[in-house]
Amino acid sequence: MEPSSTSAIVEALTRAIVEHRLQPGTKLAEQKLADHFSVSRTLVRQALFQLAQNRLVTLAPARGAFIASPSAEEARQVFAVRRMLEAGMTRAFVHASTPAMVQALRAHVARERAALDRADVGQRNALLGDFHVRMAELLGNAVLAQMLGDLVSRCALITLMYQSASAAAHSHAEHAAIVEALAARDAERAVALMQAHLEHVQANLTFDRKRPSNDLSMALGPVTP
């Protein structure tokens, strides 16, 4: 990667979070990050702002930036709202779907499988979350897509940090089953599968993992030239 780019800093920090190398609440000191990546603090601030937009980082006035610390209660509330929204979205998809829409979802599921096979944790989790937003986009409902995207981003750190590889594989399999129910235009089965899927994702979050490092240098490791 190019160590001078903001996107490279975002990618490195995201991967450290995803791979459980950084602990929630860890302070992200601007100067330490600037020294590590050999960039200006301005680039670091831009990266931290982007991470804050993605809800992976919390920016506290006069205190600095910290890895976000999502709670189990936050996850419970977010998933409750998602179950309500996505049941209606799934039913609407069955009634509005075309072969091209179903094929687009199948292609997305295939990308999930590829990310799982190559153990790409960041891409895997991004695609698993994007599946739900993609359904809203294919329906042509920009408002729903935006609302769902925000909800997915709010629980992204929770799933990135607390979802195991096996749970992620189960999510992929459940997505595939949902797509087949959509293709069969079986609204009741598709809705039931979606509800069960979201319940399984929430139930399979593991909040008692071994605590990762809060040392930035150790967590990030050497910058790849």
Image (cartoon, rainbow, N blue to C red):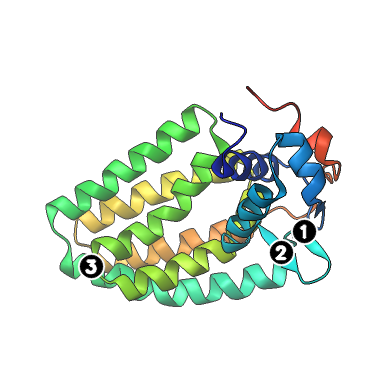
Q: Earlier in the sequence, mark 1 or mark 3?
A: 1
Residue toward you, 2 or 21 = 2
Q: Do residues under tags 2 and 1 come within 8 Å of each other at their CB atoms? A: yes
Q: Position of residue 156 (x, y in %)?
A: 58, 57
- Disc sitting over residue 140 in the figure: 3
Q: Earlier in the sequence, mark 3 or mark 2?
A: 2
Question: Gap in Å between the C-alphas at discs 1 and 3?
Answer: 36 Å
Residue drawn at x 46%, y 34% is 115
Q: Position of residue 209 (x, y in %)?
A: 79, 47
Q: Tell me the crowding category of disc 3: few under 14, some 14 to 19, or many 20 or more residues within 10 angstroms, Cα based.
A: few
Give the quadrant of the C terminus.
Answer: top right
Asked if residue 11 lies left or right of residue 104, the reply is right
- Residue identified by numbered label 1: 66
Tell us which disc is closer to us: 1 or 3.
Answer: 1
Find residue 141 and report its image quarter: bottom left
Q: Tell me the crowding category of disc 2: few under 14, some 14 to 19, or many 20 or more residues within 10 angstroms, Cα based.
A: many
**Identity of the amino acid at label 2?**
Thr
Q: Position of residue 13 (x, y in %)?
A: 67, 43
Residue drawn at x 58%, y 44% is 6
Residue toward you, 19 or 224 = 224
Residue drawn at x 17%, y 62% is 97
- In the image, residue 151 sits, relative to residue 135, either above or below, namely below
Question: Gap in Å between the C-alphas at discs 2 and 1?
Answer: 5 Å
Q: Tell me the crowding category of disc 1: few under 14, some 14 to 19, or many 20 or more residues within 10 angstroms, Cα based.
A: many
- In the image, residue 13 sits, relative to residue 99, either above or below, namely above
- Residue identified by numbered label 2: 58
**Identity of the amino acid at label 1?**
Phe
Label 2 sits on a secondary structure element that is strand
Residue toward you, 2 or 218 = 2
